[in-house]
Structures are given as structure tokens and as C-alpha cells.
Image: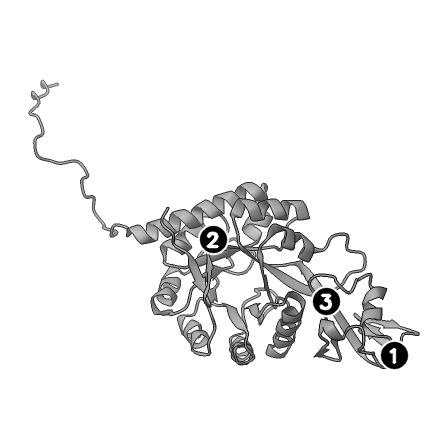
Amino acid sequence: MTRDPLRIAGQEFASRLILGTGGFPRMETLAEAIAAAEAQMVTVALRRIDAQARHSLADVLHGCGVRILPNTAGCFTARDAILTANLAREAFETDWVKLEVIGDERTLLPDAPELLAAAERLVADGFVVLPYTTDDPVLARRLEDVGCAAVMPLGSPIGSGMGIRNPYNIALIVEAAGVPVILDAGVGTASDAALAMELGCDAVLCASAISRAQDPVAMARAIRAGVEGGRLAYGAGRIPRRLHAEASSPMEGLPEYPQAPPS
Amino acid sequence: MIRLNGTQVEGRDGATVGDLLADLGVESQARGVAVAVDGEIIPRSEWGSHTVPAGASVEAVTAVQGG
């Protein structure tokens, strides 16, 4: 296969599938899914240290050799997200952050004004900001304008598995973006990931579809194949959709058959 | 009294950040740990020397599974 790396903020990734680590029932399954997904970057959340925790996630991920992308999940204000990003920078020695500022507990949809404010401040503080955003092309443009290194529009709400509800908006975001577009949230199965890539997204971030599948490792493999297939199809250039059929066999040179006897 | 990850802790006024992390079972070399005292991040290099005054609130965080 031709070399076709994903580039974010000057870093190259052979893999276009970013794995969210949330929802895996066992740490061993997570490690196997990372290998099956061939992911090079995985997200983590930051929470208070639990003295009873048996495994250190940071140690497991270090063993997998993947880049850690900390998120600001659980933050509802720009202020909380900025503090969380700074804690993550200290904990993981990375300037990269998946910025989430949530506006509503039930839908977990982003809070646009808080998100934009946090993004602007974090960029100014030297962070490489990858914001989780709605599928609003104007908000995506504003996030790019304040210096985000990528935009991460949702296909549908986090964990919903509803796929890409508005492919036209995703296409509009891709068309206008000068930074990578990473489809984040809503992927339910491999075809959703393939569609994202066919629409021109540069990568897919996927957690629940893999971690909560009946067989997470098999689904990691399937979604990886979906991402790869979609990317190849995007590059190959699909045929236009048409209302009527267009024969794929020639009409010329048909033999003449005897007429059927009258019945 | 110090507030450590939301719990009031007695008899630790003036302890260092490193001492409080040890209370949580965290070694000074532990991977993926960060600490804020009253909202101010204390770099790892200062864990051994930074003392936490009475009444301070300490948040000690680490990586957990998350999307």
C-alpha cells in the first residue's frame, strides 16, 4: 500500500484510527484491541487517584507503545477544561489535548462558546488542541481560525452508535478545513467509519463501538479495515450517483434468438 | 486539616505533596500523575519540597479509561 500518513501538527501517523480507551471491561482486552486496531494514539481521561486501583492505565499504555492523547471529558466550563489540560500536560508530558467542553449531560453535546474560549486560551498557552465539536461547519472554521491543530466533529452523540447523522455537514467541514478533520463520536460499526473516510475525513476516533462490542478485539479489526477501505475509496474517486441504470455490459453484438412459439 | 481528593485529612498540615501522594499509594516515579494545590499545578520536580498548608485543597489525578 502507498504510504499515506496522517499528519497532525507536524507529527506523522501511519494509522488513521485513534482509539478511545473508555468502556473496555478489562485492561487486557484494551491492550489487545489497541494491537488489532493498529492504533498509534489513544485517548485517556484524568480523574482523582484511586488508592484501590489495581492496574495503572498509564503503565499499560506505555507498554503498548502508543501516544497518549489526554481529554478534558467531564468539563462543563472553559475554566475547568483549561485546568484539566494543564494537569494532563504535567502528567503525560504532552502538549496535545483532546478538548471537550460539554454543554448538556443528557446529550453530551459540546458547549460552543465555552469550547471556543478554551481552545483559544490553550492554543495561546502552547497546546496542540484537538477539539471535539458539533458537526457545524461554521464552528469548525472558528476553531481552526483560533489555531486548533485539527477539528473533531461528531457523527452523532457520544456512545450513541447512531453513525453519521448529517454526512452533508461533515462533507462541508472537510471541504473548508485546512487542518485534519477527525470524525469523533457516533461510530457504531465498521461501515460508519468507512463512510467518514469516504466523505474525506482524515481519521476516525472510536471508543464505544469497539470497547462495548460483543467482541471488542474483532470489532477493532473490523473498524480498522473500515477506515482503510474508506480512505482507499476516497482516493479512488467514487462514481456519481444517478437515478437510472447504466448498463455495465455492452448492448452491441447481441445474438438474434428465434422468436418464442405462440402460447 | 487538608482536603485531599475531596476527603478531609487530619494531621497532615505542612506535609509535602510527595508525602500526600505516598498516602494515596503513589510513588514519586509513578507514570501519568499530576497534582494541583488550590488550583495551582505543582511540577513533579517540586513534589518533594512543596509543603501543603492547613486548609489547602489538593487534587491528585491520573489516567483512567476514557473516550
Q: Is residue A224 left or right of residue B44?
A: left
Q: Is residue B50 left or right of residue A89?
A: right
Local secondary structure at mark 1? loop
Q: Nearer the viewer, mark 2 or mark 3?
A: 2
Q: Would you say the residues marked 2 and 3 are in contact, meaning their CB atoms lie under 8 Å apart? A: no
Q: Chain of mark 2?
A: A
Name the residue tied to disc 2: A15
Report the front residue among A31 and A66.
Answer: A66
Name the residue tied to disc 3: B61
Of the 4 image quadrants, the one containing the C terminus of chain B is: bottom right
Amino acid type, label 2 = Ser
Residues marked 3 and 1, same chain: yes
Name the residue tied to disc 1: B14
A164 vs B47: above or below: above
User: Callout 3: 10 Å neighbours few (<14), some, many (20+)?
Assistant: many
Residue A36: percent from left, percent from top: 54, 44
Mark drawn on residue B32: none
Q: Chain of mark 3?
A: B
User: Callout 2: 10 Å neighbours few (<14), some, many (20+)?
Assistant: some
